[in-house]
Amino acid sequence: MPRNPRYDILFEPVKIGPVTAPNRFYQTPHATGMGNMKPNSSAALRALKAEGGWGVVCTEYCSIHPSSDETPYAYLSLWDDDDMRQLAVTCDAIHRHGALAGIELWHGGSHANNRGTREIAIAPGDVSAKFLNPTQIKGMELADIEAFRHWHRAAALRAREAGFDIIYVYAGHDYLPFQFLSPLSNQRSDAYGGSLDNRCRLLRELIEDTRAAVGQDCAVAVRFAIDELQGSAGIEAHGEGRRVVEMLAELPDLWDIALGGSLGNDSCSSRFSAEGYQEQYAGIVKSLTTKPVVSVGRFTSPDTMVSQIKRGVQDFIGAARPSIADPFLPHKIGSGREDEIRECIGCNICRAANNEGSPLRCTQNPTMGEEWRRGWHPQSIAPAKSEATVLIVGGGPSGLEAALSLGQRGYRVTLAEAGTELGGRVINEAALPGLHNWIRVRDYRAGLLARMQNVDIYLGNALSASDIADFGADANVIATGSHWRRDGVGACVHHPVSIPEAGNIHTPDDVFAGAELGGKVLIYDDEHYLMAGALAEKLLSQGLQVTYLTPQTMISSWSVMTDEQEFIQQKLLNLGIELIVSQGIDRVVDNVLYSLCQYTGKLWQQYFDHLVLVTGRLPDNGLFHELGGRAVRIGDCLVPSSIADAVFSGHRFAREFDEDPASLICRRERAMLQ
């Protein structure tokens, strides 16, 4: 299909210093959890973005020296020529598809734990490590600053030699150059401290050093945290953040605008931010410089993108998460297929992967991170190997993904859903406060399935084992999901406890089914992800009195991985929640939950009018067992997990169906003996 002409502006080339981007789609630097230990995987992932039409494809944070080491987390490095040769492979892969390659030179300063290299960590002053460990950080002397400038220049030269077109000076996310800028972390009294001019001195020198070293061949970009969201005590967009840009406005070739402090500020989940949420910050910078500006905002709507360009907010559409959810977003817009965009839901499962030290994954895009090791591609899949027919029972995330992918392969598929609408668990979770974007998991798949002639969908069909046998499909796939446990077993409590059957004791399933709660509501969380916190917010917003009890030390503790925990706890505390931590369920008698302190074993009593148990889940696999080996299970019916894992399970089944098992072992990247 031809491109809609109203989107033509997105495909205009843009000059960045000595290089020119072929369009305005700019994949900003983002972590992959692969780093220098998985170079083939990393190169394949970045190449895919370029193939998908991103005009600029940047790598992840790249250490310039062993004193910037974030072991055990994955990062790139440019410490020596071996690193340079390794990164050249990624550059070549990006260039093959006509995109520019960018690299973000990184020094963590007081955020670098150096557990791998055992180098002394450095920062503007003598402070404790930002990583929670007993290490102190050495305040940089003038000789250390000169050494740092030398490391940065040497890394820039290696980056140019590797083939990068855009080289970053990284003054964002509270890393070393930003630590010099911020009055919160820079209490020096010499030429690099005190006044803003002095605190800005190192950033100016880094830009000038990099331009002198590589500026004739490479664009020099600055990633700058214009606001660290600490008010006037720190760098603030309408205060010193603005003044920094005014001072350096024309020095770099491009400004990449970010937010400081926690990475969760810059990659804020959809639960706490809307599309384009950084517009005000990019707009300030754009008003102060003639150089191109880029910022992120979880952009998925081409109309929002065009609006920002035409209104002069920024020159590029910066994206990390949307480029993960759909690496082919630019090509889809360019070929008139914007209705096929696999929109990011802003769940931040991608951020969780890096925070866990594992390769990138995505709820919407199950192929992300599997480009090299499994050979998966988000836009292509092997054709059917036979005339086999497939019956899928269950229209939740795994069933929908399996049906879509099998249909794309060319198999004849029938999907039977017992309910009156598709989506399964996604319907309930998307109805929780702030999670409405999650319905995109359902809508994207349902929209494509509706166009397929080889896929039939039947709603309101609760099939029995005999129904399935009578249907006579060649393969039966059970994707009937899971249900919440009522016996207290969760992440911290591993054995069933005594809980009576009572009308005022509920699971999330009961709440979603319309159970009426009132009086004092006690939510017991031993799942530690989103459910308990989101239900608490829902009930608090209805004016109910809510107490949150958990064996952990904070609300929604696993959401630290998705960079949401601070936002969740802050919101619930502001809404008036009563918080009780470090207590696990022991038993329930009448309207009293008896809990044990996780540390002392002391017994406590918590009174309630209604109790909501958010613990573990059990697979709804009764139908599977009735079929006695004549079916396979996928998604939560196999093992309850995240929506991302359910989608992956459905996709993997579809990819591997009818294939030779010997060909399905994924490749691994191995360290080689020297």
Image: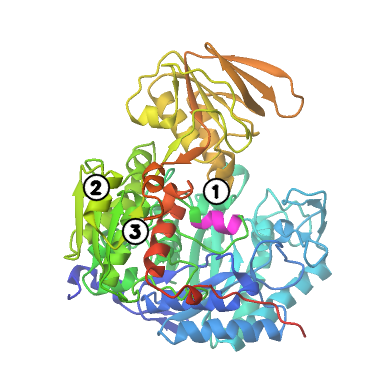
Q: Is residue 299 left or right of residue 182?
A: left
Colour scheme in use: rainbow
Q: Earlier in the sequence, mark 1 or mark 2?
A: 2
Q: Relative to residue 276, is residue 216 depicted above or below?
A: below
The disc, 1 or 3, on the residue closer to the chain's N-terminal end is: 3
Identify which amino acid the numbered label 3 is placed on. Answer: Glu
The residue under the point 68% across, 23% down is: 596
Q: Amino acid at mark 1?
A: Asp
Kind of residue at badge 2: Asp
Asked if one can make out residue 310 in the rendered structure from this viewpoint, the answer is: no
Q: Which residue is mark 1?
A: 563
Residue wearing tag 3: 401
Name the one closer to the observer, 284 or 140: 140
Instruction: Give the image location of residue 10, x and y in percent.
Output: 30, 71
Label 2 Cα neighbours within 10 Å, binned few <14 / some 14-19 / many ≥20: few
Mark 3, mark 2: which one is toward the viewer?
A: 2
- Which residue appears at 66% of the width and 77% of the height? 670
Compared across the picture, whether 156 is left or right of 524 comes to right
Q: Nearer the viewer, mark 1 or mark 3?
A: 3
Q: Quadrant of the N terminus?
A: bottom left
Which structural element holds mark 3? helix
- Residue 453 location (% of width, % of height): 16, 65
Residue 233 image position (x, y, % from top left): 62, 43
Q: Nearer the viewer, mark 1 or mark 2?
A: 2
Question: Can you give x and y, in whole percent of width and height, for residue 422 in the image?
Answer: 26, 47
Q: Write the start and end of the magenta stretch as one range.
A: 350-355
What is the chief secondary structure element of the magenta stretch?
helix
State yes or no: residue 390 in magenta.
Answer: no
